[in-house]
Image (cartoon, rainbow, N blue to C red):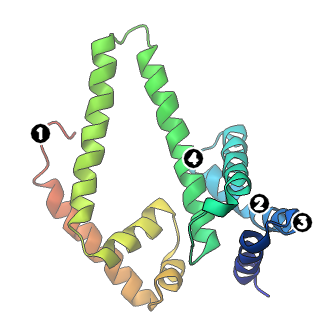
């Protein structure tokens, strides 16, 4: 059984009965892959390990509230990525707020500007067709290659490439209409 299908099998078994041995098998199967992925996002190995532990702990503690997922790999990758990014943002905000050179007003402005940028980018992404948005997310946020994007979307590699390419082109057009505070 390939790793992806094995992970899906273990995931379903764990969610069904909460067996700690099955959870440990899932952990053992996925940990190294997830760590390598997380380490590509954040080179701070201890921070990646902490984020991974938080992901696994959340799954262990909230088994009954884990949403149904098509692919546990994607769920785990997204969960890890979100944890790493959230922690990086939190640290950056704290660093800005405690910077001796930044006034409280400058720190607040930096946080608000970042929130506005994220909102504007979210609006631009929302204008894209769903498949393009999903393909862009898989390609750039999860850093999957085109064959993996194709597998997740259930399309050919060429179609996956087309979704990503069209999405990028549309976003580039949107950058021309960006507000002046964006950059």
Q: Which mark is residue 115?
A: none
- Res 71 → quadrant: bottom right
- Res 125 → quadrant: bottom left
Mark 1 or mark 4, which has the lower sequence index?
4
In percent of the image, x 28 and y 31: which residue is there? 112
Look at the numbered discs 2 and 3 and tell me whether their residues touch, using CB distance below 8 Å.
no
What residue does disc 4 label? 83
| Number of the front mark, 2 or 3 | 3
| Number of the front mark, 2 or 4 | 4
Q: From this viewpoint, which residue is outermost toward the bottom?
A: 156
What residue does disc 3 label? 21
Query: Where 123 sits versus 165, above or below?
Result: above
Q: CA distance from mark 1 to mark 3?
A: 55 Å
Look at the numbered discs 1 and 2 and tell me whether their residues touch, using CB distance below 8 Å.
no
- Counting from the top left corner in percent of width and height, residue 56 is at 72, 54
| Number of the front mark, 1 or 4 | 4
Q: Secondary structure at mark 2?
A: helix
Q: Residues within 10 Å of mark 3 (few under 14, many from 20)?
A: few
In percent of the image, x 40 and y 83: which residue is there? 160
Mark 3 or mark 4, which has the lower sequence index?
3
Q: Which residue is nearer to you in this view: 12 or 53?
A: 12
Mark 2 or mark 4, which has the lower sequence index?
2
What residue does disc 1 label? 180
Q: Which mark is residue 32?
A: 2
Q: Is residue 162 left or right of residue 146?
A: left
Q: Is residue 169 left or right of residue 6?
A: left
- Counting from the top left corner in percent of width and height, residue 123 is at 22, 56
| Number of the front mark, 3 or 4 | 3
Q: Is residue 140 left or right of residue 68?
A: left
Look at the numbered discs 3 and 4 and tell me whether their residues touch, using CB distance below 8 Å.
no
In percent of the image, x 27 and y 14: which residue is there? 105
Q: Quadrant of the N terminus?
A: bottom right
């Amino acid at each position: 059984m390939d790793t992806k299908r094995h992970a899906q099998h273990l995931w379903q078994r764990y969610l069904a009965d909460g067996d700690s041995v099955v959870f440990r098998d899932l952990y053992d199967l996925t940990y190294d892959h997830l760590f390598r992925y997380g380490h590509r996002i954040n080179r701070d190995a201890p921070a990646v390990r902490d984020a991974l532990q938080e992901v696994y702990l959340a799954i262990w503690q909230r088994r009954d509230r884990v949403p149904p997922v098509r692919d546990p790999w994607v769920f785990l990758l997204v969960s890890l990525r979100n944890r790493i990014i959230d922690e990086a943002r939190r640290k950056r905000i704290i660093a800005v707020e405690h910077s001796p050179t930044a006034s409280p007003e400058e720190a607040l402005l930096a946080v608000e500007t970042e929130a506005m940028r994220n909102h504007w980018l979210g609006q631009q992404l929302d204008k894209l067709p769903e498949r393009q948005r999903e393909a862009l997310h898989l390609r750039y946020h999860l850093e999957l290659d085109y064959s993996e994007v194709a597998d997740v979307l259930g399309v050919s590699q060429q179609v996956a490439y087309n979704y990503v390419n069209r999405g990028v082109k549309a976003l580039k057009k949107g950058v021309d209409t960006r507000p002046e505070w964006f950059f």
